[in-house]
Image (tube, coloured by chain):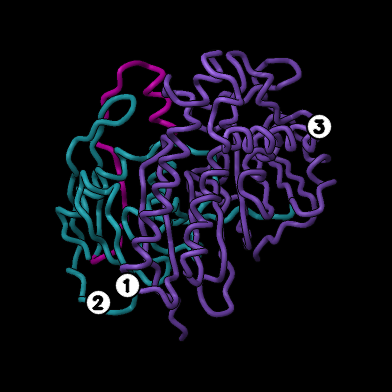
Chain colours: A cyan, B purple
């Protein structure tokens, strides 16, 4: 096989990267802004200016429960300093079994994309499309609680 | 250490997905760049309003239901359908919006087309470089930083924590796959669900065409890949259901 798989603690769906405004280089230059519920208009600028030392230590927060296309869910994130180290979904309620199957497929993908957006040296990920709205907003809500800059 | 140029980022919810922007403003002020992004978003929403098959009053829905003829619809509908016909022929019929039940459905080309239109707005506004990612279908121009290429990871079809490959992209890249949520990839020749590809990626100058060709490659597997190989400006990268891979030899895989 010509291409060995790239294992990434990290990857990136630009949808989430856009919302979360991760910088793909050092995690310390990531800037997060916007507020949950308004992510569709959250235009942010990231760059090397205006960096502040991130809060130290490992912290967790759970975002608000958000409606998504097939039910509702909440997202819990763990950060160490300003770096997201884990993303889990402690609460998910779906209308039917099919939706649960969909969610089971989507959540790990989005999880890896949130994590990967911080570290992989890539600008975006090309993949089959999905709807990431509620998940991303909920991640944003968790991030806002932690005041990750 | 060279700092990458700062991006102005934006994420827009439209067409049932998220379209994200990374813009290198260059000589544009931040305000001008944001204005250009807003204009590009307006183009996306207009495309959604015109081409959505979910909105019963959209021009394309009216065409599908026989409430309107092509001649009565906005000119861009005819333009998109012409492109669809071009790709239908170029793909050996593996992309065929006319083969689906319920009337012509250009959805497999429209998202790429709309993103391409949006990117043209950013380019003509004078941005140095930009990337737009329409839920996994990506169009770029310019360079993300001095001497850099846009690097795009291709999602691994089975392992959510892995990329199948990284590709340097100069214009457009689209990926389709059977892991797609709500996927209804159909073999246009049999009408049965298609299962010849786990992941199908196409690169080339036009995202509209790459998007449709990725749909063709996902439905047609190796046979569709041979049609893509015959197109000078386009490249295909196929991961089969058994995990084996092939490509057309002209995709800029990064190390």
Left or right: B162 in relation to A30: right
Question: Where does the image place residue A34, in percent across and percent down from the top left?
Answer: 22, 56
The foreground one among A110 and B95 is B95
User: Disc 1, disc 3: CB below 8 Å?
Assistant: no
The foreground one among B144 and B40 is B40
Q: Which residue is drawn at 26% across and 65% down?
A: A82
Q: Give the range drawn in magenta.
A: A81-106
Q: Residue at x 72, y 32 (%)?
A: B85
Residue A86: in magenta span: yes
Quadrant position of residue B8? bottom left
The foreground one among B84 and A120 is B84
Q: Residue at x 25, y 58 (%)?
A: A79
- Dot 3 falls on a residue whose secondary structure is loop
Task: Report the residue that reaches farthest toward the bottom.
Answer: B1
Residue wearing tag 3: B92
User: Disc 2, disc 1: CB below 8 Å?
Assistant: yes
How far is disc 2 from disc 3 in space, using C-alphas? 53 Å
Q: Residue at x 70, y 61 (%)?
A: B252
Residue wearing tag 1: A29
Left or right: A129 in relation to B105: left
User: Disc 2, disc 3: CB below 8 Å?
Assistant: no
Q: Residue A51 carries which label?
A: 2
**Chain where mark 3 sits:** B
Q: Is residue B49 above or below residue A1?
A: above
The foreground one among A24 and B157 is A24
Q: Is residue B170 above or below residue B181?
A: below
């Amino acid at each position: 096989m010509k291409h060995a798989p790239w294992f990434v603690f990290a990857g990136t769906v630009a949808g989430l990267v856009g919302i979360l405004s991760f910088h793909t280089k050092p995690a310390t230059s990531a800037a997060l802004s916007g507020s949950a519920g308004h992510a569709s208009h959250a235009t942010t600028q990231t760059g090397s200016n205006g960096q502040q030392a991130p809060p130290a230590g490992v912290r967790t927060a759970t975002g608000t429960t958000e409606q998504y296309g097939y039910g509702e869910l909440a997202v819990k994130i763990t950060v160490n300093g300003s770096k997201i180290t884990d993303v889990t979904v402690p609460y998910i309620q779906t209308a039917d079994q099919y939706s649960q199957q969909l969610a089971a497929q989507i959540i790990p993908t989005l999880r890896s994309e949130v994590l990967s957006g911080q570290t992989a040296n890539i600008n975006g990920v090309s993949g089959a499309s999905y709807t990431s709205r509620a998940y991303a907003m909920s991640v944003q809500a968790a991030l806002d609680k932690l005041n990750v800059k | 250490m060279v700092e990458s140029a700062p991006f102005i980022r934006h994420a827009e919810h439209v067409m049932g997905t998220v379209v994200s922007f990374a813009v290198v403003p260059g000589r544009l002020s931040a305000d001008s760049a944001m204005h250009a992004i807003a204009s590009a978003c307006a183009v996306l929403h207009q495309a959604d309003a015109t081409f959505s098959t979910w909105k019963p009053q959209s021009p394309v829905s009216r065409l599908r239901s026989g409430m309107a003829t092509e001649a009565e619809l906005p000119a861009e509908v005819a333009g998109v359908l012409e492109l669809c016909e071009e790709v239908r022929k170029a793909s050996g019929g593996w992309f065929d919006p006319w083969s689906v039940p319920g009337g012509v459905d250009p959805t497999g080309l429209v998202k790429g087309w709309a993103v391409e239109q949006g990117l043209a707005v950013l380019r003509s506004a004078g941005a140095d470089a930009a990337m737009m990612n329409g839920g996994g279908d990506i169009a770029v121009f310019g360079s993300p930083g001095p001497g850099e290429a846009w690097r795009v990871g291709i999602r691994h079809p089975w392992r959510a924590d892995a990329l199948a490959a990284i590709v340097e992209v100069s214009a457009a890249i689209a990926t389709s796959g059977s892991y797609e949520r709500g996927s209804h990839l159909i073999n246009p020749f049999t009408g049965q669900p298609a299962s010849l590809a786990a992941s199908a990626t196409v690169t080339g100058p036009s995202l509209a065409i790459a998007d449709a060709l990725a749909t063709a490659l996902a439905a047609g597997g190796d046979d569709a890949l041979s049609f893509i190989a015959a197109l000078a400006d386009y490249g295909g990268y196929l991961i089969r259901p058994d995990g084996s891979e092939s490509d057309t030899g002209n995709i800029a895989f990064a190390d």
